[in-house]
Amino acid sequence: MRIKKPRTQTGIHNRNSFRVISLGFMGLVLTGALLLMLPISSCDGSVTPFADTLFTAISASCVTGLIVRDTATHWSLFGQAVILVMIQIGGMGVITIGLTITRLAGKKIGLWFRGMMQDSISAPNVGGILQLTKFILKMTAIFELAGAVLLAPVFCMEFGFFRGLWYALFHSVSAFCNAGFDLMGVKEPFSSLTSYGGDIYVNTVIMLLIIIGGIGFLTWDDIARHKFRFRQYRLQTKTVLVTTGIIILAPAVFFFFAEYADEPLTERVLHSMFQSVTARTAGFNTADLSKMSESGTMIMTVLMLIGGCSGSTAGGMKISTVAVLFLAAVSVFRRKNDVEAFRRRIPADTIRTAGAILFMYITLSLSGAIAISTADSQPFMSCMFETGSAIGTAGLTVGITTSLSLPSHIILMILMFAGRVGGLTLIYAAFASPAEASRLPQEKITVG
């Protein structure tokens, strides 16, 4: 018989944290949507329909990059600034910004707020969370300003001094936050960075910003503490760095031989590397993705679903999730009881959580693709690409987003929000923590 125990304060604390995180993103989205409706936000001074501003606000706040209005030609400087602020807050996290504002106001940061920050960035413990927050703000400012300085000469030469500086800052923040919003629609609407497909300098700067933003705040902290002493890194950092390298290089090799074989060597290398990097939820593209083969499109979809790292500006189910599931499979193949990596055992609850996340992402992306394909009579693979891009907060598109109906846009908005906030966060926020109980009898189920 089950013996119920009183609900712990920890359970209440965690649930409230998840609710605040979810509500914080909702508040950011609604505020941004209303600001974008103002006549000052559009180039022609008109009021943009709420459905379009809501889609844009969710895409920016969830650092996705899918758009229904071209960012450069529809939105004014004020509108673009609103979008950039939402990208910045969404990339760093509403709790990080809230904690920073609270500290600047001179208020004391209590244990509850520290715990909420821990949940927000997936920190291993509450201790040192304020120092970690300061470190995040410092490194974000350094990398984004460095990116803007590096991009400024190119954009100032092309668009003029002041406009070039704005373009440099906008694209640096967008790349670092893995958002994928761009201002290149002045050349051709919805063109992203295709005009720089052969530019080694711009490609390199953008790719570095995407990778640095996507490896995670905790990874930066570990590298800053231990420099290049790999053996002293946490298991999380080791797993992130190794898996990131594999996930970038392996698809790039495939793209090099299968997708861009007819292009000159420089463009071939750049396109292959850039598409592999940007699929980690960055949303920029330097080549027409609608011309990719079905196998290439499928690989891009998988990469978008995987995404970046936990506690980073990137979305997706996260690299560590895939790494844990791969290691669990290897342990089964080798008939080992423990899942191991770098001479450490991985807890069973981590493996269960990884399995639940994988199931959730695949179910939501497939269900959304089926619904959109049925509602708008679009090819299923194209719809799968769009839903994978939405829930992975990647922002890449094969060109069908603007032609979809309102119900399909609503599906994409739900997927973007779930992908950024986190499906498990939404579930934990909605349901109470179960009361502790005695363990039931165990019985095996045959699988495989």
Image (cartoon, helix red, strand yellow):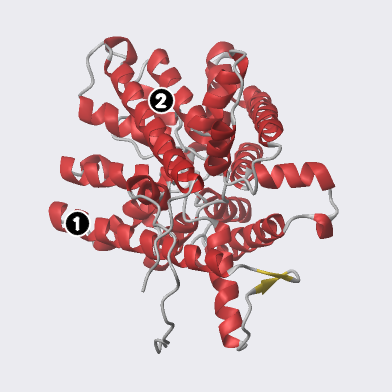
Residue 164 shows up from this direction: no
Name the residue located 40 percent from the left edge and 48 percent from the top edge: 419
- For the residue pair 69 and 432, the one nearer the viewer reads as 432
Residue 230 shows up from this direction: yes
- Give the residue type that dot 1 points to: Ala
Please tell me whether mark 1 sits on a helix, a strand or a loop: helix
Earlier-in-chain disc, 2 versus 1 = 2
Residue 265 falls left or right of residue 56: right
Q: Quadrant of the C terminus?
A: bottom left
Mark count: 2
Q: Which residue is mark 1?
A: 371
Q: Nearer the viewer, mark 2 or mark 1?
A: 1
Name the residue located 56 percent from the left edge and 84 percent from the top edge: 332
Q: Residues within 10 Å of mark 2 (few under 14, many from 20)?
A: few
Horizontal and vertical percent for residue 146?
69, 28
Horizontal and vertical percent for residue 322?
53, 65
Please tell me whether mark 2 sits on a helix, a strand or a loop: helix
Residue 283, above or below 265: above
Residue 304 falls left or right of residue 248: left
Horizontal and vertical percent for residue 117?
56, 36
- For the residue pair 305 and 422, the one nearer the viewer reads as 422
Check contact, mark 2 vs mark 1: CB within 8 A: no
- Give the residue type that dot 2 points to: Val
Residue 89, above or below 366: above
Horizontal and vertical percent for residue 304?
45, 54
Label 2 vs label 1: CA separation? Answer: 34 Å
* Quarter where residue 214 is shown: top right
Residue 372, above or below 64: below
Name the residue located 69 percent from the left edge and 27 percent from the top edge: 138
* Quarter where residue 78 is shown: top left
Q: Which residue is mark 2?
A: 186
Q: Quadrant of the N terminus?
A: bottom left
